[in-house]
């Protein structure tokens, strides 16, 4: 349930930030968008980035986003292969 909520919030945050960028108004800081990705919303960040074509040219942002995704993938793989089988 948590992952559904955080990923939904992340997609909405990317959409809101894109809308605000077009209106030239107050924006969501990049740190907050990356934080949402880091707490479990990385799939939502990737989907939001793709749907809204947002933050695609910001190399620093993209680098950090993919670092977060890579770390979460490694941790997820470790949990699935090492920790969870031992709990059976």
Image: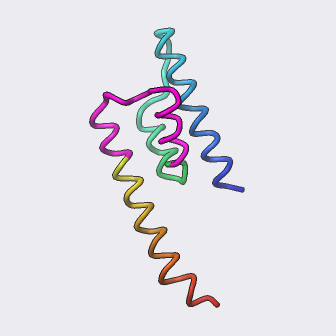
Residue depicted at 47% across the width and 34% down the height: 49
Q: Position of residue 15 (x, y in %)?
A: 56, 27
Could you tell me what secondary structure mostly forms the magenta stretch? helix
**54 within the magenta span:** yes
Indicate the position of residue 25 as horizontal and vertical percent values: 50, 12
Residue extending farthest to the front is 51
Report the residue at 64% width, 41% height from top: 8
| Residue lying farthest to the left in this orientation | 59
When the figure is inspected, residue 28 is found, relative to residue 47, above or below; the finding is above
Which residue is situated farthest in the top direction here? 23
If the image is split into quadrants, where does the C terminus sit?
A: bottom right
Q: Position of residue 41 (x, y in %)?
A: 54, 48
Taking depth in this image into account, of 17 and 43 the one nearest to the observer is 43
User: Which residue occupies 48% across, 21% down?
Assistant: 27
Q: Residue at x 57, y 32 (%)?
A: 13
Compared with 5, 85 (above or below) is below
Where is residue 87? Give x, y as percent. 61, 88
Q: Which residues are magenta?
A: 43-65
Quick check: 20 above or below 3? above
Residue 38 or residue 47, whichever sits in front:
47
Q: Is residue 8 left or right of residue 74?
A: right
Tell me the colour scheme of the image: rainbow
| Residue 17 sits inside the magenta stretch | no
């Amino acid at each position: 349930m948590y992952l559904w909520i955080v990923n939904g919030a992340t997609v909405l945050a990317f959409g809101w930030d894109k809308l605000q960028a077009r209106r030239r108004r107050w924006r969501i800081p990049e740190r907050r968008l990356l934080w949402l990705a880091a707490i479990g919303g990385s799939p939502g960040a990737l989907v939001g980035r793709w749907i809204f074509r947002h933050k695609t040219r910001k190399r620093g942002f993209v680098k950090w986003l993919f670092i977060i995704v890579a770390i979460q993938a490694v941790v997820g793989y470790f949990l699935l292969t090492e920790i969870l089988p031992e709990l059976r």
